[in-house]
Amino acid sequence: MPLRSLHAAAVLLLVVLKEQPSNPAPLNGSKWTYIGSDGEESWSKSYPSCGGLTQSPIDLHDDILQYNASLVPLGFQGYSESANQQFVLTNNGHSVKVKLPKDMHIQGLGARYNASQLHLHWGDQKEPHGSEHTVGGKHFAAELHMVYYNSDLYPSASIAIDKPEGLAVLAVFIEMGSFNPSYDKIFSHLEDVKYKGQEVSIPGFSIEELLPKRPEEYYRYQGSLTTPPCYPTVLWTVFRNPVEISQQQLMDLETALYCTRVDDPSPREMINNFRQVQKFEERLVYVSFRSEAAKKLPTKASSTNRPSNRRLRPMPEALACPGVSKEGLGFGHNLLWLPGHLKYLRALWSSTHKHSRPLGDPTILMPCHPQWERGWGKLA
């Protein structure tokens, strides 16, 4: 067996073990916050994926943008709920969350993604710059996330959360401006969920009203959850254009909520609940809109292909594998690729801790190898 194959297999295994713990971290099993001893700098101690290579959020800057003509406008189905349809608004101790009905889904991602929930991230009154993603280093006042799961592959968001092609998130930038009656359908109920664990039913409304103008203009990349357990299973769609809310609405969001329960003797305000931008390594962000900064990708390329201007080592023996091309390894829409002769590394290979080969066996790089399907026991 060539030494290069041995080295490549070893490096891949180490990356996978770092990115995906063999036992998925419980969502609420460990205490975490945004600052202090349990802040984001220590997340990876309890949630190893938070220290991985394909983390979110990121800064969307010119050097990593590439225009992709195949990115289509998303289709929003079941969004127009009437006031007779009740939503549940919850304070989960980290954000305010609205549970969404499963019949609400999006089209245009290559599979059906059913709605799970939406939530927000924001700053504080002193520094009202609470968006998670940034554009050219610029923060927005807040950011809305709509979370979906791949219902073609998985029965629920809780099952899909750590799986390949499991989740999709739509992100909306929020900036200060005019009063927004659609967002007020959430903000007007914040006092009812002031403390962690509180929830209230609110009248349903059209979630599509929360989207920005020209939603066909967006950024697309492969990343992770922005909160623990930080699983790298998210297909991100970040809308280019922000929505506006008034200064009073933003102040309500920044001052109404607490991270602690109503009987906690040391109440903590829910402020600055956004993660810092993460290193983006050598991935690219595809954009659906033309700009001088974004290089054009050939029309035939899909939103999940690797950039055409990168040098990748051929792997002709893997041509017959689903999700594997002659250019390198790809699993659904979650791909880490790096130039160089050893760096065909997957940052998400959640099935690796279910099926493995001996460390030096080069077929560990080929999940569709005939012997792979038989299973090789659990990683030690």
Image: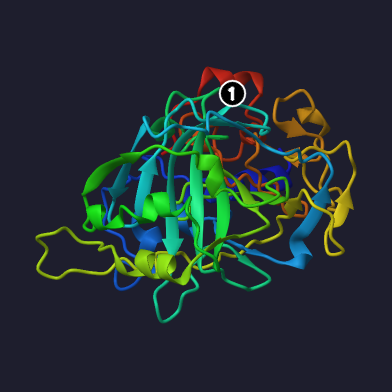
Identify the image's colour scheme: rainbow, by chain, secondary structure or one colour: rainbow
Looking at the image, is 376 positioned above or below residue 39?
Answer: above
Q: Nearer the viewer, residue 226 or 363?
A: 226
The spot of residue 329 in percent (x, y) is 70, 39
Question: How many numbered badges does the structure rendering display?
Answer: 1
Left or right of 215: which side holds 252? Answer: left
Residue positioned 70% across, 46% down in the render: 344
Looking at the image, is 265 positioned above or below residue 118?
Answer: below
Q: Nearer the viewer, residue 335 or 272?
A: 272
Looking at the image, is 274 positioned above or below residue 209?
Answer: below
Residue positioned 46% across, 75% down in the render: 128
The spot of residue 243 in percent (x, y) is 58, 58
Q: Nearer the viewer, residue 197 or 68?
A: 197
Residue positioned 56% across, 64% down in the render: 278
Q: Nearer the viewer, residue 379 or 234?
A: 234
Residue 36 occupies quadrant: bottom left
The C terminus, quarter of image: top left
Left or right of 330: which side holds 18? Answer: left
Left or right of 289: which side holds 141? Answer: left
Residue positioned 68% across, 47% down in the render: 215
The N terminus, quarter of image: top right
Mark 1 falls on what kind of element?
A: helix
At label 1, the amino acid type is Trp
Residue pointed to by mark 1: 372
Q: Give the crowd class for mark 1: few <14, some 14-19, many >=20 residues within 10 Å.
A: some
The spot of residue 335 in percent (x, y) is 66, 44
**Can the viewer see residue 29?**
yes
